[in-house]
Amino acid sequence: MRKPFIAGNWKMNTDSHSSVALTKAIAAGAEDIAGHKVDVAVCPPFVYLQSVAHAVSSSSIAVGAQDLYFEQKGAFTGEISAAMLKDVGCAYVLCGHSERRHVIGEIDELINKKVLSAISGGLLPILCVGELIEERKAEKTDEVVTRQLKKAWQA
């Protein structure tokens, strides 16, 4: 049987102090189960990744990023690579979150590049899939999720 996995995405919430306090509280609260019965990760905003990683360094709580760029390095202002995320202590990265898809406009092909970049960079991608409410009402959930899964894992 697979071990359950719980990851919390903090989105654009917390500040430097509250991110560390929340991390420590999660680590303390999950002390008896994290790593043994369930894997636990937190995905804070980029600017707090390093301090959060430091706060959980003696626990079994893992750290994940909320996004990455598919290139390894270069002139990509504001972007962050898999190597940079690994360097600050990340083990996971979200790819294809609904807000990235529907607010930012990321398409399946871009998400595929991010998934492959995460894997080649030594990160475990947390692939987010899901339909819009209109797609659900039109009974297209299976079609949408199947397409997202297939396109995300194409080599």
Image (spheres, rainbow, N blue to C red):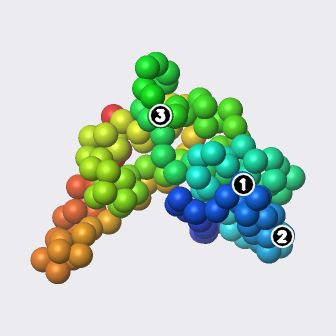
Mark 1 residue type: Ser
Q: Is residue 8 left or right of residue 78?
A: right
User: Marks 2 and 1, how far apart in space?
Assistant: 19 Å
User: Marks 3 and 1, how far apart in space?
Assistant: 20 Å
Q: Which mark is residue 59?
A: none
The residue carrying mark 3 is 79
Badge 2: residue crowd in 10 Å (few <14, some 14–19, many ≥20)? some
User: Is 126 located above or below residue 118 in the figure?
Assistant: below
User: Is 42 located above or below residue 153 in the figure?
Assistant: below
The residue carrying mark 1 is 16
Mark 2 residue type: Ala
Query: Residue placed at 23% from the left, 55% from the top?
Result: 147
Query: Residue placed at 36% from the left, 61% from the top?
Result: 98
Q: Position of residue 127 (x, y in %)?
A: 43, 54
Query: Which label sits in the foreground, 2 or 1?
Result: 1
Q: Secondary structure at mark 2?
A: helix
The residue carrying mark 2 is 28
Badge 3: residue crowd in 10 Å (few <14, some 14–19, many ≥20)? few
Q: Earlier in the sequence, mark 2 or mark 1?
A: 1
Q: Nearer the viewer, residue 117 or 21?
A: 21
Q: Position of residue 153 (x, y in %)?
A: 35, 44
Taking the view exactly as shown, the residue that stands out farthest to the right is: 58
Q: Position of residue 125 (x, y in %)?
A: 50, 47
Mark 3 residue type: Glu
Which image quadrant for residue 113?
top left
Q: Secondary structure at mark 1?
A: helix
